[in-house]
Amino acid sequence: MHDSGTSSGDSRQRVKVLVPLPLGAPYDYLVPSDMAAGVGSIVKVPLGSREVIGVVWDEGDASGLPVEAAKLKAVYAVLPAIPLTATLRRLIDWVAAYTVSPAGSVLRMAISVPDALASAPTDTVFVAGPVMPERVTPARQRVLDVAKDGVPRRSTDLAEQAAVSSGVIKGLADAGVLIGHEVPAERSFESPQPDFGPQVLSPDQAAAAADLTAKVAARAFAPVLLEGVTGSGKTSVYFEAVAEALRGNRPTLVLLPEIALTAQWLDRFAERFGVMPAQWHSDLSQPERRRVWRAVSEGRVSVVVGARSALFLPFHDLGLIVVDEEHDTSFKQEEGVAYNARDMAVVRAQLEKCPVVLVSATPSLETVVNAETNKFEHLLLPERHGGAELPTLSIVDMRAEQLPAGRWISAVLEEHVHQTIESGEQVLLFLNRRGYAPLTLCRACGHRFQCPNCQAWLVEHRHRARLRCHHCDFGMAVPEACPSCEAVGKFAACGPGVERLAEEVAERIPEARVAVLASDTLTGPARAAELIAAIENHEIDLLIGTQVIAKGFHFPLLTLVGVIDADLGLAGGDLRAAEKTYQLLSQVSGRAGRERRVGQVFLQSHLPEHPVLAALASGRRDDFIRRELEERRVHGMPPFGRLVALIVSSRSEDAARQTAAAFRRAAPHYDQLQVLGPAPAPLSLLRGRFRFRLLLKAEKGAPIQPVIRQWLARVRVPGTVRVAVDIDPYSFL
Ligand code: ADP
Ligand code: ZN
């Protein structure tokens, strides 16, 4: 046992500091006696020859070696940022352990804005003092005229309003005529008002809202599934929970899957609470990220709406987490630390001791099972708001259609499109494929344009006259002649993309005013907001869209939805193909007839008997879920079993193959688990790297993380090879 009385006598404090680098554990440092570096403090420390930012993770281990023997380096400085809470530090440890990632890599996501850790920037504002200038030029006089109202102004504003150069302002400041004060440079956030624009809720909505507000008021962990058909008012219901958190002065985090979705969501938020919430997503400018991060850490923001990475913002004492569209696969991060923000939101809520509300019209099977086994409470909104009816849904059997080449819209769908537009309503044609055509080939020699870095076809984007890879950044101009046989004018587009569909629409439905909505046309929130406004103002009759338009949107005039290829997601070996297709098609269908007019949906399919389509057509979602769950149960697949993917990749195909084989040889042997592979990944070449996959399948309770850690430790991986671990994988590419 450690005997403090006879130890080295060195009473200087030791701390463990975690740095945001792919390192598994914190390192010990010494705190100089004139410095206070409590747990959670953000510090600057030496690491090798570098100076890095880190976080004091724990008290140092006082029973270890004496300071001198351990050759500890000293902490350089404590930064002025607010220390990370114990809750956030535990979340980071938890995510690292669960995903088998270095804790430092997870920390890196939490302190993603190093600038925000320095002192807050200030601006100098000027007011006129009692002194008058010795020499009053006309320019100086204009400045004095502007400044005489006593309002503090920044130098640039003052110069602009007085129409003078900044030199004039500086001259007056140097002469002591203008007096400068330092003020925070970052704008603060306005406070949402819980009672700004309350809504009258239906009895079902009110009951669900009362349940949620009680949970927020109770300040205890409570996981809830809020399920309701599209248009049932789930957002209105969880806004009541947000209002309750506001009344209790505790912040709320709302996770949303896509930024495109937020334009309408933000407007609704502002109607309900009077101001916009803070936002967090990848499109924010660096100063904006800094402003949000700092304001969250200082407790000056009460609601943040964000994409998955908002999960790691430094909230204090969270009051509520909402995960809207909880089934959405974009909550799963595939690169780097492979985590699912939905699942980790539940973990954070548990650590924060607050409710977490998972919201969906088509909950994931994981969440369905959690609700059925009472791990989650289940709140249900069975009807559309305001008596709106769910749309009628018909399947168009494309095997019976005689469409000429290059056409994709069936006769019956075309007829309904004309009628709908004629009666002053709007149409959505859904096709989940960007660009003009998914494959371009040469009719003379059969050459197919393929990405040089990926095992994938290049997709033609005709309005830019380019061929692009949707997996890496590769792009090239469409050449004059075939690179293989030099034939000119022989290229043929195979299959439809949204651009090609737009061409067909222009020909067959010339009366329609058309907008194409895909991730490459919705370039950023501003462009998205513009297009959405045009649709709301009925400047558009027909939208052609990919999955970016499938979710969340509410367009009252939209009454007809045509799904061009309902089979698109069903092919391939993806475990969740049926589930995801079902969710996507119900979401898309849910865009139709959301107010007084009844909506109509046509699903064009070559597989009309497929269970997913049959369930959609009959409206018997339960049958589909039962069947799908039964199949997963029989095969021991999630949510009844666990999967872990190991992806071994390298620029050298041999190195990747050999390392994958070494993992096979070192595979763990336990009754509860099974290792499959290695096999070349379906995307066997991605961004210039050759990829092999192994899949570990385990029983639900199996302790997979320790098994994976031991497995990783048994194989020596050459420096040219990367091994990525994906717990609960969503992508099987
Ligand atoms: P969901 O998220 O379940 O699809 P929303 O919350 O988007 O449904 O609600 C659908 C539409 O109905 C929205 O335009 C919303 O403003 C409106 N709505 C829902 N509930 C109410 C209510 N209680 N009072 C007024 N409008 C409501
Ligand atoms: Zn590529």
Image: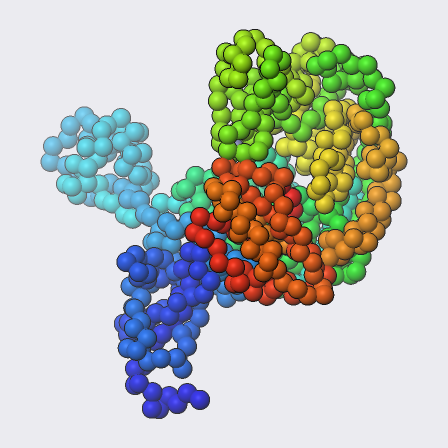
Instruction: Answer with the quarter of the image where residue 277 lies.
Output: top right
Instruction: Answer with the quarter of the image where residue 437 lies.
Output: top right
- The correct choice, above or below, for 456 with respect to 176 in the image is above
**Residue occupying image coordinates x 39% and y 45%:** 186
Q: Nearer the viewer, residue 322 or 336?
A: 336
**Residue occupying image coordinates x 56% and y 31%:** 470
| Number of dots carrying numbers | 0
Q: Nearer the viewer, residue 725 or 659?
A: 659
Residue 250 in view: no
Q: Is residue 644 left or right of residue 377?
A: left
- The correct choice, above or below, for 398 with respect to 709 in the image is above
Q: Position of residue 215 (x, y in %)?
A: 69, 60
Q: Is residue 432 left or right of residue 253?
A: right
Q: Position of residue 317 (x, y in %)?
A: 55, 61
**Residue occupying image coordinates x 56% and y 17%:** 462
Image quadrant in which the N terminus is located: bottom left
Q: Position of residue 472 (x, y in %)?
A: 51, 34
Q: Is residue 538 left or right of residue 140?
A: right
Image quadrant in which the C terminus is located: top right
Q: Nearer the viewer, residue 304 or 109?
A: 109
Q: What's the colour scheme? A: rainbow
Residue 178 in view: yes
**Residue occupying image coordinates x 62% and y 13%:** 443
Q: Position of residue 281 (x, y in %)?
A: 52, 42
